Image (cartoon, rainbow, N blue to C red):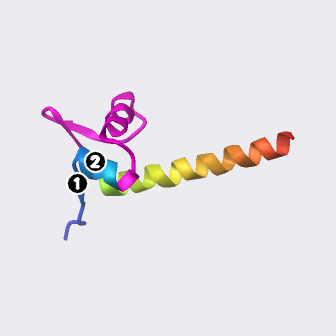
Amino acid sequence: MAEDVEVLTTEEAASLLRVSTKTVLALARQGSLPGEKVGRAWRFLRSDLLGYLHGAAGGAAARAANAATLR
């Protein structure tokens, strides 16, 4: 049986990420946020957004650790 995949709208993605829809659209357009354009609307996989969050959080922690070692 196929895996259940939750597809989110821009508004739902913004709510999940706790940012504005403008931020979601800007990140998607520049390729930072994984998503697909369907007609005039963007769609996002929940699993991709959660992966983005974990990657962004990991990146911030790595930057903080690097900054601490430089001091």
Q: Which of 13 and 2 is in front in this view?
A: 13
For the N terminus, which image quadrant? bottom left
Q: Is residue 67 magenta?
A: no
Check contact, mark 1 vs mark 2: CB within 8 A: yes
Q: What stretch is highlighted in magenta?
A: 16-44
The residue that mark 2 highlights is 44
Judged from the image, the secondary structure of the residue bearing numbered disc 2 is: strand
Question: In whole angstroms, how far apart are the C-alphas of marks 1 and 2?
Answer: 6 Å
- Horizontal side of residue 34 vs 60, given as left or right: left
- Is 28 included in the stretch rendered in magenta? yes
Q: Residues within 10 Å of mark 2 (few under 14, many from 20)?
A: many
The three-letter amino acid code for the residue at tag 1 is Val
Q: Residue 45 carries which label?
A: none
**Disc assigned to residue 7:** 1
Left or right of 41: which side holds 28?
A: right
Quadrant placement of the C terminus:
top right
Residue 7: x percent and y percent? 22, 54
